[in-house]
Image (cartoon, rainbow, N blue to C red):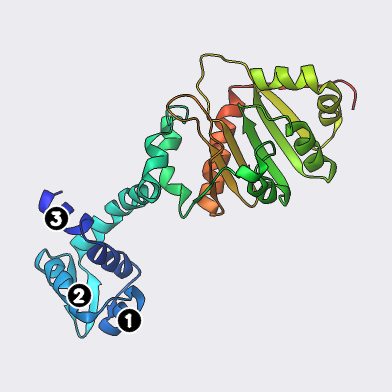
Amino acid sequence: MNPNLLDLILFSEKRKDFLLLLKEGPKNAQEILDRLQVPRTALLPQIKKLKEQNLVIHEEGMYSLSLIGEIVIEKMQPLLATLNVFEKNEEFWADRKLSPIPPHIIKRISDLGNYSLIEPDLSHTFDLNPEFVKHTSNSNHILMFFSYFHPQFPVFFLELARKGTEISLVLSESVYLRLTEDFKKEVGEFLRMQNTSLFILDKKEVETPAAVVSSDKIMILGLFNESGRFDRQYVISFEPGAIEWGKDLFEYLRDISREIEIKEK
């Protein structure tokens, strides 16, 4: 792509939004102004530049993408969606370890969509984050991976399972060992339930995220920072694409894990 054309699209929010709006189909001037919420005097010069580059056509009072414009925007949209993810919280992503996410999944990080961050709740320093608990507790089925330990995990897992939630749980080996040492009874009860499964990721050479949760309602992601510390910040998204993204990441981790089974049911 011509660098000047790239600059034309990326370095103006008005031009970028205008082109993405036309991807929906032809629009008249008033509809465009209403949807973009910009004054006519601010938008017209940007439209003129796009017409000069043959990206936009203006015929019979309607603006539409040219064939070149359609091809360019079709290719640009994944890039724009990816940039939106990182630009939304630049400091967060700059300090996160992304290497634990396999290439075929990290390439789809734009699927996170309109996500938000759950920040640490200082008033609940020793508790699981209330936002985390609230958004996971109303799910019918849930996939969860954790590679950090919290003393409230056993109660949290059991409360979900006891009310009938289908749970597939993957734990790092260190977390599993901690649970079996200090919460053997709770682990046994969890394993005997018909609506639960437990897997252990014991491959020490495999880097992992801190947490991955994907349910029928939500996706939650926790990542270690570059220092290897988890600061209890979670990415949270309710979008279907993000839920599927989280499911794929969970399944990648589950597939390299081993299942723990108990004979008595």
Quadrant of the image for the C terminus? top right
Residue with the mark numbered 3:
5
Q: Nearer the viewer, mark 2 or mark 3?
A: 2
Q: CA distance from mark 1 to mark 3?
A: 25 Å
**Looking at the image, which residue sits at the far top?**
204
Label 1 or label 2, whichever comes before in sequence order = 1
Label 1 or label 3, whichever comes before in sequence order = 3
Q: Nearer the viewer, mark 1 or mark 2?
A: 2
**Residue 170 against residue 41 in the figure, above or below:** above
Q: Is residue 260 visible?
A: no
Q: In the depicted view, which residue is nearer to us: 124 or 180?
A: 124
Residue 66 in the image: x percent, y percent?
Answer: 20, 67
Disc 2 marks a residue whose amino acid type is: Ala
**Residue 60 against residue 183 in the figure, above or below:** below
Residue 123 in the image: x percent, y percent?
Answer: 65, 45
Circle 2 — which element?
helix
Residue 28 in the image: x percent, y percent?
Answer: 27, 82
Q: Is residue 240 visible?
A: yes
Circle 3 — which element?
helix
Q: Residue at x 17, y 76 (%)?
A: 44
Disc 3 marks a residue whose amino acid type is: Leu
Is 64 positioned to the left or the right of 259 in the image? left
Residue with the mark numbered 1:
31
Q: Dot 1: few (<14), some (14–19), or many (≥20) neighbours within 10 Å?
A: few
Disc 1 marks a residue whose amino acid type is: Glu
Residue with the mark numbered 2:
42
